[in-house]
Every structure is written in structure tokens, then in C-alpha cells.
Image (tube, rainbow, N blue to C red):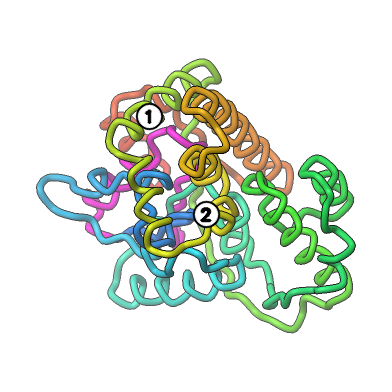
Amino acid sequence: MDCDLIAILGPTASGKTSLAAALAHRMNTEIISADSRQVYRRMDLGTGKDLDDYVVGGKRIPCHLIDIVEPGYKYNVFEYQRDFLKAYDDVRNRGMLPILCGGTGMYLESVLKGYRLLPVPENPELRRQLAGKSLDELAVILSTYKKLHNSTDVDTAKRAVRAIEIEEYYRHRPVEERTFPEIRSLIIGVGVDRELRREKITRRLVQRLNEGMVDEVKGLLASGIRPEDLIYYGLEYKYLTLYVIGQLAYDEMFSQLETAIHQFAKRQMTWFRGMERKGFTIHWIDAPLPLEEKLEQIENLLK
């Protein structure tokens, strides 16, 4: 298959990272991450970086766009497109076929479809109008837009406000002001049925807690990052921060976080199905298959 990029996507805990690393090792190439939270340094367990997965056959597979900004910063899809292009051009110029891997739908779609984006400034008046609204109320408002923003990540009020701010900005701006190259991509989806996905999510959550995810959050707070800035990132950082600052008991934190991750994975799959309806061709591979069999399926598609 004549393509410029291989993309491997899937919901959280589907095993896409280990598959991408194994493929990169076999093809002697490098990975570009498409994860909106793994860009942050020192946010490792909570973002599921699974850094050991990048070691294959004793060799560490290079992965771009992980650990590139400090916690507390509000990284966005416009910056992701910019940074992706630099990494993509770097890998291509060294004669390799890059592998894009991640589960952040908007990041994936923005580069696979070549969306023409502009940086979006803060809108103080809009923020005043939205102040005090609940996450559910903000979600209803966000649903009235065309979904330029990555709604799979919107699980805090602050992120919902930012998403609405972005949508409102683009509603009144032409998108022709920015260009993005056309990239021919082979898109691989790692599919996992609902029950197995739930089992893997719960098992991985317990493992990461045992490995010190609470201490990671305590360390980030001790370094001067404000609780509200960590809560902004949602999921693990939202619920673990609430636990650390005493607003949730441990059992409450675990139960609510487990539910939130299950809901997040469901939203990811909804996003990927939406991509297919928009015309993306995603070749789905079953997660439980042996690694070698999954690699053979990808190689057959490439041929």
C-alpha cells in the first residue's frame, strides 16, 4: 500500500501501544504519539505512558511528542498539529515510515484529515457567561456545535468551557487561513469487546495505583502545581487530586474513577465510529489475537 503514515488507534487499555512498538521494531521506524495528556512531563502513571512497552528486543523505540511540555500548561490541538508536522517531517526525511499511535480522537483526526486550524485566544466575556454552569449544562451547550473539539476528553467544567470557547471562535472564522499537507494513511484500529475492555481497564487501574499513582499526584502538587490545574486534565488527575486534597475517600475515588474511565473508553469508540461515518477507512484488528498475528494482518494490508 502506497502510504505516508501508519496510524494505530484504539480505546484506552486496548494494547495499541505495544502493537505500535512491535511494528516499529519490525519496520525499523519511529512512533509519533497522539495522546493529549502524555505530552506532559512527570505525568506518567496517570496518563498511562506505559514506557516499558516501547522497549522491544532490548531496543527502545523512539517516540515523539511525549514529555514535551510542563504540567499546568494548556496544550491544544493547534499546537499538536504544529508539533506533529515537525516530528513527521523529521522521520520521513530520514527515510522511515512513521507510525502514529494514540487514542485522542481530535488529535488523530486533525492530522489524518489535515484540518486547517488557528490558535484560539481566551474569550473573557464568554467565560463570564459560562461561569457557574455544571458540566452537564456545558455539555449540552457544546453539543450544539459541529464538534471541532475533542469531546472525548471533556470531563471537567474547565475543559468544557475551553471546548466551547474553541467552537465559538471557529464559528466566526474562515479556516482557509492555514494549510496542512495531505497525508496518505493506513489506519489500523485495535478493537476490543466491551466486557474485555472493562476487565482490562479495571485491572490496569489497580496496577497503576499499586505502582504509585497517588504518590505521583502528591509529587505534582508538592512541586507547586495547583489542584485546579491537575483537575483540569480529568480522569486520573481529577479524581486522585480530589482524594489527595481530602474531598473524596479512597473507595469513592476508586469507584468514580473506574466509572469515568469506562465512560471515556466508550466515548473514544463513539468518536472512532464517527470517523468512519466521515469517510475514514479503519481496518479493525481484534485485541485478543496473538501479537504475531496482528503484525501479519498489518503487513498484509501494507502489501
Please name the residue shown 79% across and 59% down the image: 164
User: Element under label 1?
Assistant: helix
Mark 2, other Cα within 10 Å: few <14 / some 14–19 / many ≥20? many
Residue 281 lies, with reference to residue 60, above or below; the image says above
Say what amino acid the circle numbered 1 marks. Answer: Arg
Pick whichever, 234 or 93, lies toward us. Answer: 234
Q: Where are the magenta residues, as a range?
A: 1-29
Instruction: Write down the residue under mark 2.
Output: 230
Q: Residue at x 43, y 47 (%)?
A: 47
Q: Relative to 268, say whether 279 is above or below.
A: below
The answer to whether 180 appears left or right of 33 in the picture is: right
113 sits to left or right of 166 = left
In this image, 17 relative to 107: left or right? left
- Asked if residue 268 can be seen in this view, the reply is yes
Q: Position of residue 266 (x, y in %)?
A: 62, 31
- Residue at image point 41% right, 27% down: 287
Q: Quadrant of residue 2?
A: bottom left
Examine the rendered structure and indicate whether residue 261 appears above or below residue 74.
above
Write the residue at 52% across / 68% down: 73
132 falls in the magenta region: no
Q: Secondary structure at mark 2?
A: helix
Q: Which residue is mark 1?
A: 204
